[in-house]
Image: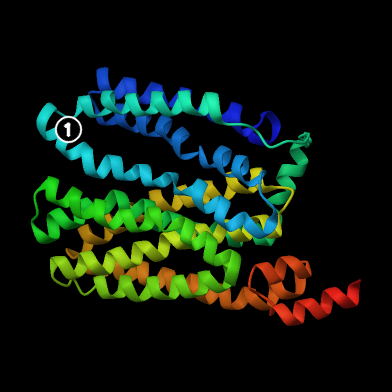
Amino acid sequence: MTERYGGRRTGLIGMGVTFLPLLLAWQFADSFSAFLGIGLLLGVAGASFAAALPLASGWYPPEHQGLAMGIAGAGNSGTLLATLFAPRIAQALGWRPVFGLMMIPLALVWLCFFFLAKDAPGKRRVRKWSEYASVLKVADTGWFCFIYSLTFGGFVGLSSYLSIFFHDQYHLTKVQAGDFTTFVVLFGSFLRPVGGVLSDRLGGHRMLLVLLSVTCLCLGAVATLPPAFAALAILALGMAMLGMGNGAVFQLVPQRFPERVGILTGIVGAAGGFGGFLLPSILGSVKQASGSFGIGFAVLAFAALGGAAALLYLKGVWRRTWPALAAQRAGLRQAQAETEVYAAGV
């Protein structure tokens, strides 16, 4: 929809649709199956990345894509509203008013977006459906989906699961568990633009390799189930790595697919959302089977290690197959070597 109708129009439609599940949860939801339907509709809000990121991307040149996409992607800091305020509102007023009150900031953002958002200049080329399907046949699409399912999926999944972890493992109150989660999510949210900026300077591939390696170490440390405040500090560092990793992934996407940012954002973003759905399910199943949170975090550590190993393999592949300038911006080539290649080409 973003590529066909523009990010502004798509964003307004998406936010408009998001009012429906909030209204249903506020007034009518009374069963588990009803909440499954509400969760499905709330997925439209998660899909807003496919409108916001191309909208921002279109205004900036390739060398500033990391910063632009990082700032736009920092919208996931809205998670802080839920983890910080929802437990307190539910404790004071009940859980239903939580959904009703969330319609207020949504309405304010809708109005701001209506008056302030603008699509980038230039004519949009309407592509055939076969062109969209062809993107799925490119191997790099799958690799981006895999990496983003680790970074964004890890961020989203842990954001929704850590309250349970802090409450059950360390016997905190629900409000305290929400505060601990908010502290951790804060790092992942607001460091996403930092990841984009550093990726513009150092290259998204190089950044991701470091970030996933540190994430692996953090998750492995949490798997030992350290004391509560030690776990809080380690998870804050790990979430910071995942948040910066989100920015790094979308520094790479415009380098590899400069003309397909919209559709790639939707595909890769969907993979990240799926990872965010899968992670709590895995952690919950492992906890139920083993009786320990530690084994689940160990599984996540190995997943992050797998992502780092994949990046090591992809370095050689991408250096051979990507355009020279794109490879340099991704951190796959040294600047001087790239200058020589470019000069020879000229």
Residue sitting at x 62%, y 31%: 118
Q: Quick check: 304 left or right of 258? A: left
User: Split into 4 quadrants, where in the image is the C terminus?
Assistant: bottom right
Say if 333 sits above or below 187 in the image: below
Secondary structure type for disc 1: helix
Which colour style is shown?
Answer: rainbow
Where residue 228 appears, x then y in whole percent?
14, 65
Answer whether residue 296 is visible to the viewer in this image. Answer: no
Residue sitting at x 69%, y 53%: 61
Name, please, the residue furthest toward the front. Answer: 116
In this view, the residue in front, 85 or 314, is 85
Q: Quick check: 183 left or right of 19? A: left
Name, please, the residue furthest toward the right. Answer: 346
Where residue 56 appears, x then y in whole percent?
60, 43
Report which quarter residue 314 is drawn in: bottom right
Residue located beneath label 1 in the image:
89
In this view, the residue in front, 230 or 131, is 230
Answer whether residue 68 is visible to the viewer in this image. Answer: yes
Q: How many marks?
A: 1
| Label 1: how many Cα within 10 Å (few below 14, some 14–19, many 20+) | some
Name, please, the residue furthest toward the top. Answer: 27
Q: Quick check: 67 left or right of 58? A: left
Residue sitting at x 22%, y 60%: 287
Where residue 68 appears, x then y in whole percent?
57, 51
